[in-house]
Image (cartoon, rainbow, N blue to C red):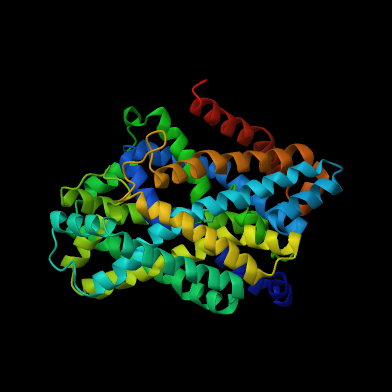
Amino acid sequence: ALARPQSSAARGLWSSRWVFFLAATGSAVGLGNIWKFPYITGENGGGAFVLVYLACILTIGIPLLMAEVMIGRAGRQNPAGSVARLAALAGASAHWRKVGWLGAFTGFLILSFYVVIAGWALAYVPATLGGAFSGADAAASTAQFDALLADPLRLVLYGSAVLAVTMLIVGLGVRDGLERALRFMMPGLFLLLLGMVGYAAIAGDFARGAAFLFVPDFSKLSAEGFLLALGHAFFTLSLGCGAMMAYGSYLPKGVSIAKTSLLVALADTTVALLAGLAIFPLVFANGLEPGAGPGLIFVTLPIAFGQMPLGQVFGGLFFVMLVLAAVTSTISLSEPGIAWLNERFGVSRTRAVLLTGAVLWLMSLASVFSFNHWADYQLFGHTFFDSMDYLTANWLMPLGGLGTVLFTGWVLQKEAVREAIGIAQPGWFNAWWNLLRYGTPVAITLVFLNLIGVL
Ligand code: PHE
Ligand code: NA
């Protein structure tokens, strides 16, 4: 949800912690869990990739999530402003604010394709409810998905709808409605996923699906797979782009950053694993290819919805929940940039939204055309959509994360950080502090060196 300072400050402590947890989980849980996690796991051979991804969440994602929330809460501004304020307090250069700029820019690039994928989910709501998938087999489902990709007008309409709703919510700040939506959406999505896992256990090849996800075979993991696992840890926890800093800036003092961050990461990981458990048994049972790419869930799940009892309703609901989960993420993606334009330059939220919305809309067209008209125009072997996805998750987010951990661990003073993060036990604090100072930057740097081929 879009919590603004007044709102959090005015609420009681428990309610605020809960609201923050909902907002942060709303940001984290999205297409990354349900769309991206299964398809990149499928492309990268399964279990070994999942294991590396989980290790990245644990050793890099959670410590960084804590640092971002802490910077936001201590700085009480948009990400760039918060970093600049803390830098000033520590007597460091104001250049560190560029970490915040980079984040807002990254969020912007992510939005340009994220709304298009959310548009796919939205297009699948009427299709599923209307029975388009009744009795569909793998071939029929694939044909329908291909037809959607080949239809720029439909893609633009649905993607624009998602963008418009996001901008409306961010511009008006209708956080109450959003909060209420989150309260039923999160448990609802969770229950639907559980139901899907149950269905996959009965109708799918569950043993094979689970083995694919959880039995690691490192011979199937390429060097590139490591990078993608790290990049996905950033993407799925909304890290390295200011989103969690922006939300942290509305967090009341006294709430445990460590506990809340752990819970957010746990919720996010659970949703991703459930999505995997729902999808892979069906992939194998229907003779589909796990490495089929970005269309994986859009081809696989409708087959199940077309066969199960009440599948039209169930499937329609599923895609509604997916769109809602995506919108709570797009809101957090826009917040750093909008808040920055607003707080730094006095641009009203409405104008900021109209301005960025217009630019984003144009960029989203490039994403749409990546799947049809411009599918053959490629930069370095990638379409515009691929390039944006690759650049943001694997380069810009880790880069923003690296800037954040260096800033926290090496620029801010240890005692100031100890106070701001509020971890009482010295052992836990030191463990986190050292991980952040040494472990995280070294790990990210190794991945970068690997990316540019030095390692
Ligand atoms: N974490 C979101 C997801 O998994 C995507 C996201 C990235 C949201 C960055 C905000 C910031 O879908
Ligand atoms: Na996520």
On the picture, is 330 further left or further right than 258?
left
Q: Nearer the viewer, residue 172 or 174?
A: 172
Q: Quadrant of residue 154?
A: bottom left
Q: Residue at x 38, y 57 (%)?
A: 117
Residue 316 to residue 215: above or below: below
* Residue 408 on image: x %, y %: 73, 43
Q: Quadrant of residue 347?
A: bottom right
The image quadrant that residue 92 belongs to is top right
Left or right of 253? Residue 174 is left
Q: Residue at x 40, y 66 (%)?
A: 323
* Residue 151, placed above or below residue 224: below
Residue 192 relative to residue 59: left or right: left
Does 181 sit above or below residue 109? below
Taking the spot 80% from the left edge, 44% from the top edge, the residue there is: 94
Please state the total of marks drawn on the protein image.
0
**Residue 423 visible in the displayed image:** no
Residue farthest top in this picture:
454
Residue 210 or 234: which is nearer the viewer? 234
- Relative image position of residue 142 (x, y in whole percent): 19, 54
Residue 224 percent coordinates (x, y): 42, 31
- Viewport quadrant of the N terminus: bottom right
Is there any visible trace of residue 390 in the rendered image? yes
> Along the line of sight, which residue is nearer the eye, 254 or 403?
403
Residue 447, x across and y down, in percent: 52, 30
Left or right? Give the position of 436 relative to 38.
Answer: right
Residue at 49% x, 51% y is: 236
